[in-house]
Amino acid sequence: MENGIKKKDESAKKKKRVDKGVDMEKLADNLQRLGEDDLLQVVQMVHDNKTADTYTKNDVEQGEFHVDLYTLPEHLVRMLWDFSQEKL
């Protein structure tokens, strides 16, 4: 707690994701190593499967797409993990 504001505990989410067999840091690294065509598929998967809690930012002018992996639903994390493992 800082300044009377309770912070969200992200460590519980992170641990849960690792327990499901997905190393979130490795997933982030894998996604950065994908080719352009594969990245377009990733963006489509995120758009098709995101929830109201999912944070994304599409910067068309810069040609960048940002996503907070910790806000993705479990099934999408698994989907992205399997996809990146298959492509690399």
Image (cartoon, rainbow, N blue to C red):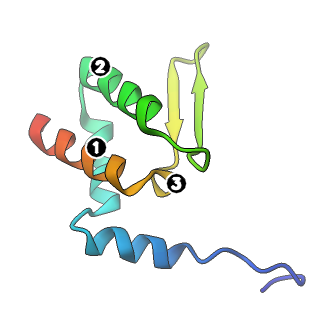
In the rendered image, the vertical position of residue 67 relative to residue 14, given as above or below: above
- At 89% from the left and 84% from the top, the residue drawn is 4
Where residue 7 sits in the image (x, y, percent)?
A: 72, 76
| C-alpha span from label 1 to label 2 | 15 Å
Task: Give the tally of numbered discs.
Answer: 3
Q: Is residue 49 left or right of residue 86?
A: right
Where residue 17 sits in the image (x, y, percent)?
A: 35, 68
- At 46% from the left and 71% from the top, the residue drawn is 13
Q: Is residue 6 left or right of residue 67?
A: right
- At 38% from the left and 77% from the top, the residue drawn is 15
| C-alpha span from label 1 to label 3 | 13 Å
Q: Residue 24 occupies which quadrant of the picture?
A: bottom left
The amino acid beneath tag 3 is Thr
Q: Which residue is mark 1?
A: 80
Q: Which residue is mark 3?
A: 71
Q: Secondary structure at mark 1?
A: helix
Q: Earlier in the sequence, mark 3 or mark 2?
A: 2
Q: Earlier in the sequence, mark 1 or mark 3?
A: 3
- At 37% from the left and 57% from the top, the residue drawn is 74
Where residue 14 sits in the image (x, y, percent)?
A: 42, 71
In the rendered image, the vertical position of residue 81 relative to residue 21, given as above or below: above
Mark 2 is surrounded, within 10 Å at the Cα level, by few (under 14), some (14 to 19) or many (20 or more) other residues, namely few
Q: Secondary structure at mark 3?
A: helix
Query: In the image, which is nearer the foreground, mark 3 or mark 2?
Result: 3
The amino acid beneath tag 1 is Leu
Q: Residue 20 occupies which quadrant of the picture?
A: bottom left
The amino acid beneath tag 2 is Glu
Mark 3 is surrounded, within 10 Å at the Cα level, by few (under 14), some (14 to 19) or many (20 or more) other residues, namely some
Q: Which residue is mark 2?
A: 36
Where residue 63 sits in the image (x, y, percent)?
A: 51, 17
